[in-house]
Image (tube, rainbow, N blue to C red):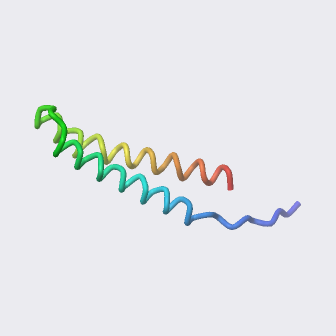
Amino acid sequence: MNKEAKAFPMWKERFGMLIIIASAIMLSRWLFQQNQWPDSLTWILSICVLPLAVLILAEGLGRLIQKRA
């Protein structure tokens, strides 16, 4: 039984990743400019937590898109 392969919607995954990265940049700017948290917490969030969150969200979005394609 041969099934025809569907075209992978890579543009959706790339667009989603750009949205996630742009959101992380905006959140990082907010952390540094308008937040009253201690500087050490702000640095940890922006250097350690935000990149990991971007990676996890982008991977999850990619898997969701591939599952529905």
Residue found 23% across the figure and 45% down from its top:
30
Q: Quadrant of the C terminus?
A: bottom right
In the rendered image, residue 25, in percent from the top left (x then y), is placed at 29, 53
Q: Quadrant of the N terminus?
A: bottom right
Q: Is residue 6 above or below residue 28?
A: below
Number of marks: 0
- Residue 8's image quarter? bottom right
**Residue in front for this viewpoint, 60 or 27:** 27
Q: Is residue 51 left or right of residue 37?
A: right
- Residue 19's image quarter? bottom left
Q: Is residue 24 left or right of residue 60?
A: left
Furthest toward the right, the residue is 1
In the rendered image, residue 32, in percent from the top left (x then y), is placed at 17, 45
Q: Is residue 58 left or right of residue 32?
A: right
Furthest toward the front, the residue is 34
Q: Is residue 40 above or below residue 51?
A: above
In the rendered image, residue 28, in percent from the top left (x then y), is placed at 25, 47
Q: Is residue 10 left or right of residue 32?
A: right
Residue found 85% across the figure and 63% down from its top:
2
Residue found 45% across the figure and 45% down from its top:
57
Residue found 37% across the figure and 43% down from its top:
53
In the rendered image, residue 26, in percent from the top left (x then y), is placed at 29, 51
- Residue 6's image quarter? bottom right
Q: Is residue 40 above or below residue 13?
A: above
